[in-house]
Structures are given as structure tokens and as C-alpha cells.
Image (cartoon, rainbow, N blue to C red):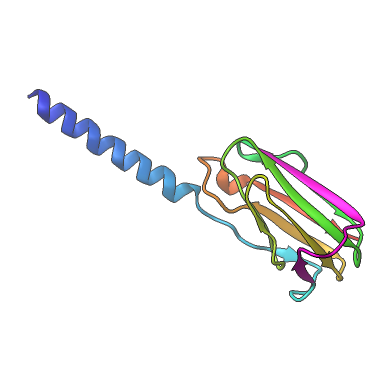
Amino acid sequence: MYPTKIKSITILLAVALLALALTACGSSGKQSGADNSSSGATDTATASQELVVHAKNWEFDKKEYTVKKGEPLKISLESQNVHGIEIANTDVKLEPGESTVITIDNAGDYEISCYIPCGTGHHEMKATLKVV
């Protein structure tokens, strides 16, 4: 009977982990007021503005970040946990410790989301990059 309990517990844990992984996925990629061709990543540009996004369990340090359109922007991600950011309708996709320089030429709101499944609150891990 003891081996049966271990097998049952193992199966239950496997199902729970699978359910957690499936519910943690998701990124709508929604964006409003901006053109899809509005940015290009480049590692050689000198940034005139800098944005550091801090991520922690299921949230970013701000709900909204504001930057100027048409100016090179250095974006960095800092996180002690497993998170990554992507910005809708741009080429930005960063993991902790990474950075890139982009220029967004079109004003609008761009959705920032975590693209690495990080737990039960993953689907709520969103912020807005407001380009003015």
C-alpha cells in the first residue's frame, strides 16, 4: 500500500505542476495608438534616455513608464527572479541583466509584459510604455 500512496502523490504533483505551467502562460500583446513599424533595436546607438524596469513576483515597479518619441532609449531589465519583458510591436525582448537601445518614432501606448512563465500571477504581469 505504501508504494501506491507514493505513486498517487507523484501523479498529483505532476498534474498540479502541469496546471500551474498552463495557467502561467499568456501575453495578449495589445497595444493602442501606435504603429507596428515604430521601433528598431540597435546596440550601437547612444541613448539620450534610459529606462530600467524592475520586476518581482508578478509585478513591475511601475504600472506606466513615459518616454519621448524619436529619441534613442536604453531599456534594461533588473530582476532577482525569473522574469523577462517584451514590449508589444517592438523588437524588445529582455531577460534579467540584459539591455538594448531602441528608438520609437510613433507616439502611443505599448504593452510591456513578462514573457517567461513565472507562476500563478504571470498573466497579470503587465505595464504600459507611454511614448509621448
Residue at x 78% of width, y 45% of height: 52
66 with respect to 97 (left or right): right
36 with respect to 71 (left or right): left
Q: Quadrant of the C terminus?
A: bottom right
Q: Would you place residue 114 above or below residue 5 in this image?
A: below
Q: Residue furthest bottom?
A: 37
Quadrant of residue 9 within the rendered picture: top left
Let me know if residue 41 is in the magenta part: yes
Secondary structure mostly seen in magenta is strand
Quadrant of residue 100 within the rendered picture: bottom right
Q: Residue furthest top?
A: 2
Residue 1: % across, % down:
7, 24
Residue toward you, 39 or 4: 39
33 with respect to 88 (left or right): right
Residue at x 17% of width, y 33% of height: 7
Residues in magenta, as a range: 39-55
